[in-house]
Image: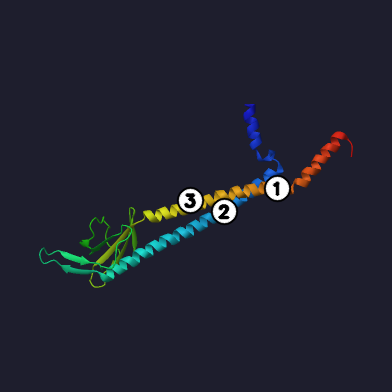
Amino acid sequence: MKRLERILAALTPKRWPIRWRLAAVSTILTFVILVIFAAVVGRLVSNKLQSNFDNELQDNAARFAAQVEITQDLSNGRPICRLGNEMALVDNASVRVVTPSAIVCEEVGTPPLGSPEPGDVTDLGSLRVATAPALAFRDVYVQYARSTDSLDATVNRLWLFLGGGVLGGTLLAALAGIAIARRALRPVSTLTTRAREIASTRDP
């Protein structure tokens, strides 16, 4: 019990040497500043990454919509869609051509992308979907979807990097605070030592 009390007493800031208290104050202030900075920067950068991702989705949907061609297969009466030979799907993107009530055609393996919402970017699970109206056809839309896994991974790495920066900066601030406090209080420590010597020897 007494050992626990001694440990708790040692952890009480009032019992710390003044240089430790000065270093602790500077470390806490640095930590707070770094947390605020990391939160602001992280939010701004992550919002920018998501905005760029959405803009790229909308641009690709618009380009597909500008080049979509729909013809009818005379043998079975089914529509045939062509989305432009020079445009390749990247990062496992999915695309389909739809009307408000039906699917005209879609890539093989395209997951359900919901109802078309022109001009909006919607989320369906891990997919983000952009919709653009086909320029050559009325009430026909192109839906372009990509997984947000890569975006989420990038944002997570960003927050991990910022968190590491906060911890690293706080550690450096603690070490610097201890060194500065020790150096600043060295004259005081010297005077205290001399005063104790004089008090013990009674020889000024």
Res. 201 image quadrant: top right
Mark 3 and mark 1 in contact (Cβ < 8 Å)?
Answer: no
The alpha-carbon separation of the residues under discs 3 and 2 comes to: 14 Å
Mark 1 and mark 2 in contact (Cβ < 8 Å)?
Answer: no
User: Furthest residue to the left?
Assistant: 75
Question: Sequence-wise, which precedes: disc 3 or disc 2?
Answer: 2
Specify the amino acid type for callout 2: Leu
Res. 203 image quadrant: top right
Residue 201 or residue 13, whichever sits in front: 201
Question: Sequence-wise, which precedes: disc 2 or disc 1?
Answer: 2
Residue at point 61% right, 52% down?
30
Residue 35 or residue 172, whichever sits in front: 172
Residue beneath label 3, please?
A: 160
Q: Secondary structure at mark 2?
A: helix
Res. 59 image quadrant: bottom left
Residue beneath label 1, please?
A: 181
Left/right placement of residue 107 relative to residue 1 reads left
Q: Secondary structure at mark 1?
A: helix
Residue at point 43% right, 60% down?
49
- Judged by depth in the image, the label closer to the viewer, 2 or 1, is 1
Q: Tell me residue 188's x, y (percent).
A: 78, 45
Question: Sequence-wise, which precedes: disc 1 or disc 3?
Answer: 3
Residue at point 40% right, 54% down?
152
Specify the amino acid type for callout 3: Leu
In the image, residue 200 above or below residue 22: above
Residue at point 39% right, 61% down?
53
Left/right placement of residue 164 relative to residue 51 reads right
Q: Which mark is residue 34?
A: 2
